[in-house]
Image (tube, helix red, strand yellow):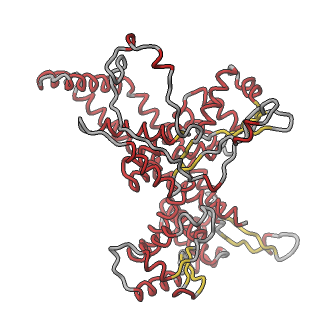
Amino acid sequence: MTQAEIKLCSLLLQEHFGEIVEKIGVHLIRTGSQPLRVIAHDTGTSLDQVKKALCVLIQHNLVSYQVHKRGVVEYEAQCSRVLRMLRYPRYIYTTKTLYSDTGELIVEELLLNGKLTMSAVVKKVADRLTETMEDGKTMDYAEVSNTFVRLADTHFVQRCPSVPTTENSDPGPPPPAPTLVINEKDMYLVPKLSLIGKGKRRRSSDEDAAGEPKAKRPKHTTDKKEPIPDDGVYWQANLDRFHQHFRDQAIVSAVANRMDQTSSEIVRTMLRMSEITTSSSAPFTQPLSSNEIFRSLPVGYNISKQVLDQYLTLLADDPLEFVGKSGDSGGGMYVINLHKALASLATATLESVVQERFGSRCARIFRLVLQKKHLEQKQVEDFAMIPAKEAKDMLYKMLSENFMSLQEIPKTPDHAPSRTFYLYTVNILSAARMLLHRCYKSIANLIERRQFETKENKRLLEKSQRVEAIIASMQATGAEEAQLQEIEEMITAPERQQLETLKRNVNKLDASEIQVDETIFLLESYIECTMKRQ
């Protein structure tokens, strides 16, 4: 764990859950797994507050627990899972594009609450959608339920591990912490629920749906609760599946930039056919025959089988090797080389960063060393056709920034500089790690800047919110235009301009966070797949 990652985790936990949860979470990230009383003692927090903080962190899968032989329960922070909170807006937006507003709200509720039962999600989403509809229109539970089933079928949501039923029937003292298990076959199995009803609009807090004030409500109505049909079956967002989708999108986009739209659509079809059958960590997709790909192409693409075969041959012969040929049966068997695709995307990211930071000449040297693997300084000057002094400066600049490394090959055992070859090389893995570390620092700086901007204009933001609330309540009661105008004038022209500047700055910072996170995703995916191969 680097300091940049710990700082970013701290900012994310504080922003989402507050100071106490942040204090406990960061302590666990720094120290590793610890039992409850040690956490309370080391952080100087009361036992009750530590328990509540751990409950929140476990609910959101940010902390895991383990029972040791002596019956001591130790809690361990999942740092990588904390960093995933950066990507929440992207998960929600992806679901919106694939499954419209209903899917978006389902994933949003699961991310906000950590874990929820299907019935609770369906009711919450139906109520929220009903709120946004015109008067008289409501959202049916069945419609939301169908979208939930589609999300489970495509593995975007999955069941949480639960306590096995046999554990409860065992005689004797209960274990210090329950052991949660999940059968892989049941991970995406949706319980058969007959959810009948429609979304409800929120009423004033002192009246219930029947219009009775709280004081007049009979007590026995609150005691009797209907049994929940899917009690104990909790669901969560499957982040690995989202990452698989992001990776596929990046590959399709890269193919479109390198070739054309038709070849990218062929690659998209191949990825879509194997998205559920291929695990997120697999080096290749499942082999697909040319005939299968032809049958699965979208309806709008009226290309002949012959043209498809030509495109597949072109893709297989491309030096980047995104698509590979694995056999000749069924008109030719093709796979997508996921690891090579990620390596190409990570390399392109590094090249882009070198070009932006050091200029096009440095990028030329960087690409040259990447291509030739090992080069001496004189060879770099000759191949890149750059004057010796400039080439030396550029190489040393990239070496000092860790984009390049220097390998020594001695002619004699004494390592004398005059009898040693000094070869420049690019270690993509270490360069990717260095860039990833910088990305974490950048995001932490962006979050701190956004918080500073908001804090500086806190009074103005509160005033703006009060004015908006007054205008909304007056519009609801049917106030005249002149009265509304008078309220709007409470915010002066300079204040309005200041608010516009703040909004523009915050939007820029938010957009920058998302863009940096896209780079983080590519680098993390590449590092993860490379480490698995080694």
- Numbered disc total: 0
Identify the residue at horizontal 41%, vertical 28% (top origin).
Answer: 456
Who is closer to the viewer here, 260 or 376?
Answer: 260
Residue 502 horizontal/vertical position (percent): 35, 36
- Where residue 454 sits in the image (x, y, percent)? 41, 31
The residue positioned farthest toward the right in the image shown: 413
Q: Is residue 139 left or right of residue 482?
A: right
Residue at image position (24%, 26%) is 472
**Residue sitting nearer the eye, 446 or 76:** 76
Percent x, y of residue 73: 77, 34
Q: Position of residue 259 (x, y in %)?
A: 42, 77
Above or below, 306 relative to 423: below
Q: Quadrant of the C terminus?
A: bottom right
- Quarter holding the N terminus is top right
Q: Give the side of residue 442 with respect to residue 296, left or right.
A: right
User: Is residue 402 shown above or below 256?
Assistant: above
Residue occupying the far top of the picture: 215
Above-or-below relation of 263 to 458:
below
Compared to residue 123, the image places residue 159 above or below, namely: below
